[in-house]
Amino acid sequence: MNQDLFTLAKGVKRIKDIEEATRLEDTFYEFLKAAWPEVDPAEFVDNWHLEDICDHMEAVARGHITRLLLNEPPRTGKTFIISICFCAWIWAQREKSALMGPQVSFFYASYAEVLSLEHSTKCARLIQSKWYQRLWGSRFKLIRVTQGLIENDQRGYRMASSVDAKAAGFGADILVADDPHLVKEAESERVRED
């Protein structure tokens, strides 16, 4: 009798996990809110602009926007959303398409390679979290996690580099330049041209 109750409880928990995973796959914004505590110990503080960024990134993933430029002040969540959570959300998708599912490849660049590598590490930490693995761990397995490369068994990868690095020969489905220059260099015509 106890074994039957245990089996039933496991089944109910699994059904709830499937429902939660489906809800979080449907909207990037809901995924972001649920993923926040897995990466950042600070309390999530909601604001309209976070949902707006997520809506735009969702439009990119669904192929409605092919080129997107977001300008946000520093420390307003842009990097957390785009450079840490976006890849994890894309790879969690049940339905595969050109830009949705674990087969999608990413190339992230920042003005400083160390910054780009830090974001890559946080993205890997999110994907490896117990929460993420409980909900989407059966969709793909990470086969390589280095400081600048996360690769899964479905041919998806997330590569990190700097804007001025030599990245010839590397392509990706989604290219992201997060803070491509220092704010104080924005007035330099040479830096902007580069």
Image (tube, grey):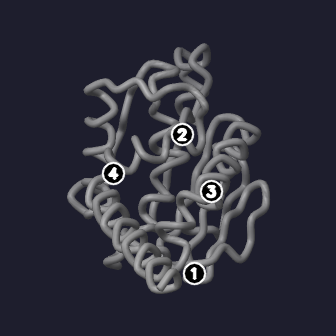
At 63% across and 68% down in the image, what residue appears?
170
Could you give the CA–CA distance between mark 1 and mark 2, rounded to whole angstroms?
A: 28 Å
- State the separation of the CA atoms marked 3 and 2: 10 Å
Query: Residue type at mark 4?
Result: Phe
- Looking at the picture, does residue 170 appear above or below residue 161? below
Give the number of marks.
4
Q: Amino acid at mark 2?
A: Pro
Front tag of 3 and 1: 3
Whether residues under marks 1 and 2 lie with C-beta atoms below 8 angstroms apart, the answer is: no
Q: Residues within 10 Å of mark 4 (few under 14, many from 20)?
A: many
Residue, x 40% and y 79% (percent of image)? 8
Residue receiving disc 4 = 28
Q: Nearer the viewer, residue 135 or 91?
A: 135
Residue 191 position, x and y percent, is 60, 27
Pick whichever, 105 or 194, lies toward us.
105
Residue found at x 61% / y 18%: 185
Q: Which residue lies under the disc numbered 3? A: 129
Q: Farthest front residue?
A: 1
153 sits to left or right of 177: right
Q: In the rendered image, which residue does mark 1 sit on?
A: 155
Residue 167 pos. (x, y %) = 68, 59
Between tags 4 and 2, which lies in front? 2
**Kind of residue at badge 1:** Arg
Q: Secondary structure at mark 1?
A: loop
- The image quadrant where one finds the C terminus is top right
Give residue 37's mark: 2
* CA gap, disc 3 and disc 4: 18 Å
> How many residues crowd around disc 2 within 10 Å: few (fewer than 14), some, or many (20 or more)?
some
Establish if 45 lies above or below 173: above
Q: Nearer the viewer, residue 96 or 129?
A: 129
The residues tagged by marks 3 and 1 sit, at their Cα atoms, a distance apart of 21 Å
